[in-house]
């Protein structure tokens, strides 16, 4: 790791550069490194603006500046630059017995803004990815309705459409951190969240088409995959803001996100957003399915367990700097970037602390502030190169304040697994590396 | 290209077609039945894909660990590099004791102790290597035809200009679901017994089905092999440091067991159990959890709702908003909020970050 950057060292380096004549100078190595994109970490040692010798990135005529590149059809469906290899979903193999009943994580530390690219939205499957021809997809509505109906995808696309941006968070996001700091990276501690724009038809319209009987109080949503995922949803929510979506970020849903059709249950836990949605049944009682009894119930210290814990609480995390996104540029201007969200609506405010929660300052929310969507916040800091304990604390439009992890443990114990929205602390060291810690 | 459900049909047909012409010493028909125990993890036959284990088409003559796109254990890959080629003899040895024959294999299957079982399953597998190929091809078109004939009339039917619109709803989109269609998909069951099909089964009848179709993952006693879910035991652990949540220790309702096993298990071969088999397995899971103690106990539609699970009363409604950190909804502190800040825990100490070979923890 590069040593702590300070003025004396920097001046020494400059001096030795000019004095040394034999062999490549530090600066030459540095700029060569920069040109090939591998010297970024080393660059942290010297302020960038001091350029005594010319930068070959500028003075050399580069290949790409001289020769023609690929034509328009080289990549019919565009892919990221090969230099962005790090921006991929990753899993934690030891968590589950098999990848077909498992989860991977959104690389939050590689992203900015509020929209998650489709290929980076985390995946959670209970029976693998169901892949089939949308012409074979049907959506059935049955139970306490006037007319039980079957829709084809074409039928569904003929209903009036809506476009809505929502976050989707798995209830188990940060679940591994209940007993203490475990995983070094916000991808792993917080990466079971994504946020895209959905296009679809409101669930209310579909239910109205079948005609809900007055004794209907609940809706069971069912998937067509090998787990035939099912969840009970109160009718009130179903008629409020749920969507039956077939597009994300403008294009068709990705197979791993439930192509061709998924349920969108804004602000509520991700497991309810049934993928490969094939059936909606109206009933007068909940069904108590496996995913709302054995799983997705929150065990408390006294042995009781909360059920139907649907809403995702107010939460935030700093995505950069973070363990997978260390500071590589030395002291001076530092952008602290993070995301905040709440199942209750919009985020009213995010505060950031750099001293482990002793003092706080209000961060700047940039970009759209939409209900039940990710919010992007920034704190533009002049870093003096000393150690930091950085935290973020979100407050939502209903006044809910993100609690500390210790407050959550005091209320629930350590075995709840789900709904851990506690404040995250990152320990930024003088060399710019970052570690997942907890503080008093 | 064949879709998965079609392939299952094809497989059954292929099995029948071949059983008469088998040459190996084992019995193909018996082997096909025994293969049920492999099916959760392996597919074989036309269109077979890798599942938890690699597909087993053309496995005879295959160097171990060489199916493209399947993530083998390094043990299996090494075995292949050491020239392990699958043949009647080597598969026989492997199936006798998988973990002894290939130390470190990730195939979590105990193996077949009986030589006859191994011979029979090998005879069945042989029908999918070279010689079996013709028979399979013969079977395929028939299946395709059958599927086409059975295709429902649900594909979009454009309405002629003068055709009458359905009377339902606002947009008159979609069509009425038939009773047969609803019955095919509506298999959910509620705690009050609503949705239970006719049928019955004893714990004794459930035992061999469980051993054959469930134990390879969940263990003979529901104790859970490797990291597969535990189904039994864990009583009185809910307040302990590491609670073990099982049907007996945690689940509130028995209806969930029936519903879930019928819709989703065995993992990788869902919807393959008959209603009576699910009653029998559910009874056996009760037996494994000491909720019934008599193997002859018979579970049926009639007595189902009388069975209560011990932890039912311990589920409470969501009262998160009443927690003090939310009810004290005052302006949060901004300056000098605490006297001293110490680091009390570090991920480095408990480092289970991916990239390391650590094992432990669990996600639900």
Image: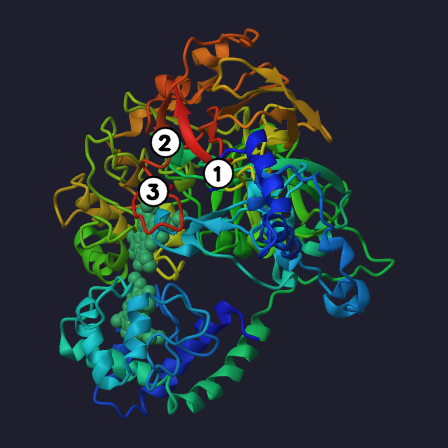
For disc 2, the chain is B
Image-based side of A135 in relation to A314, left or right:
right
Colouring convention used in this rendered image of the protein: rainbow
Question: Which quadrant of the figure contains the N terminus of chain B?
Answer: bottom right
Name the outermost residue toward the right. B161
CB within 8 Å, label 3 to label 1: no
Q: Nearer the viewer, residue A218 or B159?
A: A218
Residues at marks 3 and 2 on the same chain:
yes
Relative image position of residue B271 (x, y in whole percent): 40, 58
Say which quarter of the image contains residue A67. bottom right
Disc 3 or disc 2, which is closer to the eye? 2
Image-based side of B162 in relation to A348, left or right:
right
Residue A211 visible in the shown view: no
Q: Residues within 10 Å of mark 3 (few under 14, many from 20)?
A: few
- The residue singled out by tag 2 in the image is B346
Label 3 to label 2: alpha-carbon separation: 19 Å
How many marks on residues? 3
- The residue singled out by tag 1 in the image is A323
Residue visible at 20% across and 52% down in the picture: B202
Q: Residues within 10 Å of mark 1 (few under 14, many from 20)?
A: many
Residue B115 visible in the shown view: yes
Q: Secondary structure at mark 1?
A: loop
- The residue singled out by tag 3 in the image is B362
Disc 3 or disc 1, which is closer to the eye? 1
């Amino acid at each position: 790791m590069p040593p702590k950057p300070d003025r004396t060292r920097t001046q020494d380096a400059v001096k030795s550069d000019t004095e040394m004549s034999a062999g490549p100078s530090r600066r030459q190595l540095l700029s060569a490194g920069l040109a090939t994109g591998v010297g970024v970490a080393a660059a942290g040692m010297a302020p960038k603006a001091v350029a005594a010798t010319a930068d070959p990135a500028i003075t050399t005529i580069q290949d790409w500046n001289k020769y023609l590149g690929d034509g328009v059809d080289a990549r019919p469906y565009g892919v990221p630059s090969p230099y962005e290899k790090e921006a991929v979903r990753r899993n934690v193999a030891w968590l589950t017995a098999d990848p077909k009943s498992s989860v991977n994580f959104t690389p939050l530390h590689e992203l900015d803004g509020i929209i998650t690219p489709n290929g980076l939205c985390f995946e959670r499957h209970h029976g693998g990815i169901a892949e089939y021809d949308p012409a074979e997809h049907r959506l059935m509505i049955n139970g306490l309705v006037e007319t039980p109906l079957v829709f084809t995808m074409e039928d569904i696309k003929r209903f009036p459409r809506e476009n809505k941006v929502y976050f989707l968070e798995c209830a188990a996001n940060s679940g591994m951190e209940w007993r203490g700091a475990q995983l070094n990276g916000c991808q792993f501690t917080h990466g079971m969240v994504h946020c895209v724009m959905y296009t679809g038809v409101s669930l209310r319209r579909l239910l109205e088409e079948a005609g809900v009987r007055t004794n209907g109080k609940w809706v069971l949503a069912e998937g067509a995959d090998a787990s035939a995922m099912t969840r009970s949803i109160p009718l009130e929510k179903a008629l409020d803001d749920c969507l039956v979506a077939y597009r994300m970020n403008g294009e068709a849903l990705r197979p791993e996100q439930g192509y061709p059709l998924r349920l969108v249950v804004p602000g509520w836990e991700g497991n309810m957003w049934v993928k490969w949605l094939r059936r909606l049944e109206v009933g007068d009682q909940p069904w108590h399915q496996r995913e709302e009894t054995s799983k997705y119930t929150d065990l408390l210290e006294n042995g009781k367990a909360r059920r139907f814990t649907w809403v995702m609480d107010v939460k935030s995390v700093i995505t950069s700097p973070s363990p997978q996104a260390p500071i590589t540029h030395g002291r001076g201007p530092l952008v602290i970037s993070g995301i905040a969200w709440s199942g209750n609506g919009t985020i009213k405010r995010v505060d950031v602390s750099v001293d482990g929660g002793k003092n706080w300052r209000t961060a700047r929310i940039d970009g759209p502030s939409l209900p039940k969507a990710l919010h992007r916040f920034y704190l533009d800091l002049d870093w003096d190169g000393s150690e930091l304990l950085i935290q973020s604390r979100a407050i939502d439009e209903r006044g809910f304040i993100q609690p500390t992890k210790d407050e959550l443990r005091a209320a629930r114990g350590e075995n709840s697994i789900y709904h851990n929205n506690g404040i995250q602390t990152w320990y930024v060291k003088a060399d710019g590396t970052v570690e997942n810690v907890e503080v008093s | 290209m064949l879709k998965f459900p079609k392939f299952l049909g094809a497989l059954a047909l292929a099995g029948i077609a071949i059983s008469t012409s088998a040459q190996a010493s084992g019995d193909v028909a018996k082997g096909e039945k025994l293969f049920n125990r492999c099916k959760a993890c392996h597919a074989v036959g036309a269109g077979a894909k890798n599942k938890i284990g690699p597909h087993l088409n053309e496995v005879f003559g295959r160097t171990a660990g060489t199916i493209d796109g399947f993530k083998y254990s390094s043990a299996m890959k090494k075995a292949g590099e050491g020239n392990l080629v699958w043949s009647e003899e080597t598969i026989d040895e492997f199936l006798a004791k998988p973990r002894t024959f290939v130390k470190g294999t990730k195939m979590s299957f105990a193996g077949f102790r009986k030589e006859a079982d191994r011979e029979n399953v090998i005879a069945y597998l042989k029908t999918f290597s070279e010689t079996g190929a013709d028979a399979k091809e013969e079977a395929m078109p028939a299946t395709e035809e059958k599927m086409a004939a059975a295709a429902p009339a649900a594909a979009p039917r454009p309405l002629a200009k003068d055709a009458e619109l359905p009377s339902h709803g606002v947009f008159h989109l979609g069509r009425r679901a038939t009773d047969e269609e609803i019955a095919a998909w509506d298999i959910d069951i509620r705690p009050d017994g609503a949705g239970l099909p006719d049928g019955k089964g004893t714990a004794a009848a459930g035992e061999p089905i469980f051993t054959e179709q469930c134990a390879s993952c969940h263990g003979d006693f529901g104790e859970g092999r490797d990291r597969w879910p535990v189904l039994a035991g864990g009583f009185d652990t809910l307040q302990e440091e590491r609670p073990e949540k099982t049907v007996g220790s945690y689940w509130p309702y028995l209806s969930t067991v029936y519903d879930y096993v019928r819709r989703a298990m065995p993992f990788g071969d869902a919807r393959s159990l008959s209603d009576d088999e699910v009653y029998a397995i559910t009874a056996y899971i009760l037996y494994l959890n000491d909720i019934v103690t008599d193997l002859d106990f018979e579970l049926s539609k009639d007595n189902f709702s009388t069975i209560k699970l011990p932890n039912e009363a311990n589920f409470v409604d969501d009262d998160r908003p009443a927690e003090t950190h939310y009810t004290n909804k005052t302006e949060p502190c901004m300056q000098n909020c605490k006297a001293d800040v110490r680091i009390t825990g570090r991920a480095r100490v408990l480092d289970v970050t991916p990239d390391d070979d650590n094992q432990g923890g669990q996600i639900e």
